[in-house]
Amino acid sequence: MVMARKRVLVVGAGIVGLALAWRLQRLGADVAIVDPEPPGEGGASFGNAGAISTSSVVPLATPGVLKTVPRMLLDPAAPLHIPAGYWLRAAPWLARFVAAATPATVTRVGQALDQLLRLATEQHQALAREVGVPEVLVANGQLYVYRDEKQLSKDAGSWAMRRAHGADVRQIDRKAIEALEPSIGPAYQIGIFLPDHTHCASPARYARAVAEAFREAGGEIRQDRVLALTTQDGRVTGAQGEYMHHTAEEVVVAAGAWSARLVAPLGYRIPLETQRGYHVNLPDTGLALQRPVIPADRKVFITPMEGALRVAGTVEFGGLERPPNEERARLLYGDLAAVFPQARVEEAEDFWMGHRPCLPDSVPVIGPAQRVKGLWFAFGHGHLGLTGSAPTAEMLAPQIMGRPGNLDMAGYAAERF
């Protein structure tokens, strides 16, 4: 007797949803993905900074960060910006963010992120090989740069926390910086080099490769906007889209910054906020970077991509409907010039803005919905969506298939809110 394959619907064709759908398919499920946009186009999985950061165990909310927030909010050119008209909407999330900046919460978050991300490099390398694009991952490390010891001292706690979780964190001098990236301007005298970190030279090509491999193996990607999740007798039955009803035995919400809207009617009030990020791609800067360079005072990633240098960063609150702010994107040109004075900085014809789905404690929601049978969550990865995508798939796919492992999933539960 042939057993029927479990039918799973993944809502969201970003890199988290794609990686999860691929892994479910490999475990024997009959999987469909639904998203209003084609895979790898437009969203954060297209426009991210490309970093795969296995040691990013430090939450955004720490006591040290809170001290800098008021000053940044008063500076329109600072890395953090909240438009005047969005303050009231952002206030509840910000209150939770402040409440999360306690030593106990920081410790809990570090453990949860370490468990999720520790093997991210190996898991991404395996995924890239499986879908035929191993070359898209570049293993040249990541380089953070500081102007002086005073500036470095502000991040001492974060680097100590990374080291405590086993990261290879090497402090280097100006001579070693020049050996790695000779174009970095003389203002930056101290570096932190993470030699075992990786970056993706084309997040869009990576996502499309996963999608294509998924299709070729029999998976279905449907272009539709999910309006609501459907349930019957306490169990999920699928999702209602603009064009059709998508039936399934198991449904995974992996819709990034749009996820909270979908689960709210089922009683989940997830404090998910979009921290809007920007990037500009510059094809002819005259630079030849080998790895992402992250200037601590500018809070941006400067990453060598296929065919261009990408400058990505800023944190802007503004919700899902507010139009992009071109002035925020223009700040990125100044960031590049500050770090690489010799770079050719010709403004691109356009820029990109995307939505990072952020939770106040920096821990994504991953796992089963306790209130609705057959419903699963995989969203809220914040600034670590690319890094956390393959690990989330490895963690969650076996559970959905009824093969629970020995990982402690309590720290990722939606019910913590």
Image (cartoon, rainbow, N blue to C red):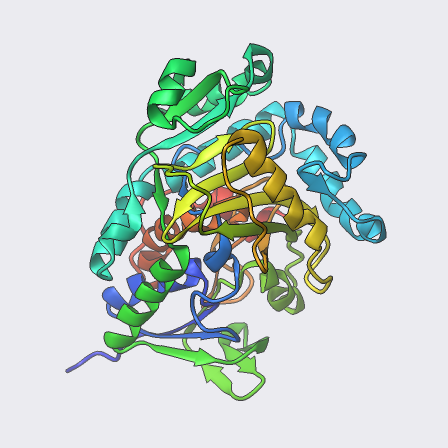
Residue found at x 71% / y 57%: 319
Residue found at x 55% / y 77%: 231
In percent of width and height, residue 342 lies at 50, 33
Give the side of residue 202 with respect to residue 150, left or right: left
Residue found at x 62% / y 61%: 260
Tell which of 324 and 235 is nearer to you. Answer: 324
As drawn, 119 above or below 259: above
Give the side of residue 389 with respect to residue 335, left or right: left
As drawn, 332 above or below 40: above
In percent of width and height, residue 50 lies at 42, 47
Q: Which residue lies furthest to the bottom in this view?
A: 243
Tell which of 373 and 200 is nearer to you. Answer: 200
Mark yes or no: residue 259 visible. yes
As drawn, 326 above or below 221: above
Q: Which residue lies furthest to the top in this view?
A: 149
Tell which of 319 and 188 is nearer to you. Answer: 188
Mark yes or no: residue 57 visible. no
In percent of width and height, residue 92 lies at 77, 46
Count the marks: how many? 0
As drawn, 130 above or below 181: below
Q: Quadrant of the N terminus?
A: bottom left
Residue found at x 73% / y 41%: 94
